[in-house]
Image: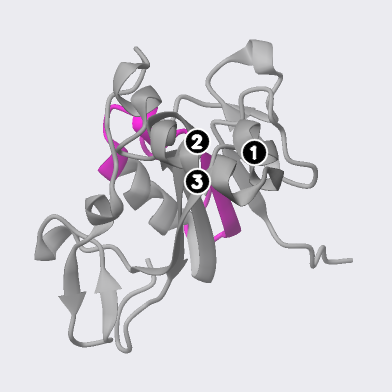
Amino acid sequence: MMNDSPTIINLGCGFNKLIGAINVDAFEICNPDVVWDLNKFPYPFENNSVDQIVARHVFEHLDDWWGALGECARILKNGGRMHIGVPDESSMSAITYRDHKHIFSLLSFHGIINYTSGSNAWAKTVETALPLKMIEYRRVPFKEYEWMIKWCPWLLSFCAKHLRNFIWEQRFEFQKQIPIGGKNE
């Protein structure tokens, strides 16, 4: 009997495991399903084998975030989705946290346009184009600060103005799209 449930990978899970996902982390103490250093390529998954990838607060810690994004594109199925969460560029935690190696903004993932398919090919160069299209971008409060949203509007406005450097993260959603006539390797 075939298993029709989607294959979901939670990269850099730490102690925040997702039920129903393959939880991956470099540290055995987190008791992940797969122990793997995300700085080591290739990842231990087959090409085009994953329906969804979740990477919350992972990419800012990696040595080669672009290589990791390429690995994610490799293992995603065509139409598969990837959810990335990183600290907002204006967040003090993005700058001051000692293990952060990269700071991201909306433009971090901005690349060239693949005129053959009409999709965004997020890349540093034409040769390194990835078949990923950004389908959503949101700037949201860190989960730890969501309780503030229930405050009265003037207090929320005051705190948003004066605490903006602490409470925001960015969430990106990409979808793998192979150009017409392109290779799905």
Alpha carbons under labels 2 and 3: distance apart: 6 Å
Q: According to the image, label 2 marks what residue?
A: 159
Say which element carries label 3: helix
Give the quadrant of the N terminus.
bottom right
Is mark 2 in CB contact (under 8 Å) with mark 3? Answer: yes
Q: Can you tell which quarter of the image residue 64 is in?
A: top left
**Location of residue 65 with respect to 20 vertically, above or below:** above
The reply, left or right, for residue 78 in relation to residue 182 is right
The reply, left or right, for residue 4 in relation to residue 74 is right
Residue 14 makes an appearance in the image: yes
Percent position (x, y) of residue 84? 47, 48
Say which element carries label 2: helix
- Which callout, 1 or 3, points at the residue further toward the start of the chain? 1
Q: According to the image, label 3 marks what residue?
A: 157
Magenta region, residue range: 39-66
Percent position (x, y) of residue 15? 68, 23
Alpha carbons under labels 1 and 2: distance apart: 9 Å
Residue 148 has which mark? Answer: 1
Q: Residue furthest right?
A: 1
Give the quadrant of the C terminus.
bottom left
Alpha carbons under labels 1 and 3: distance apart: 10 Å
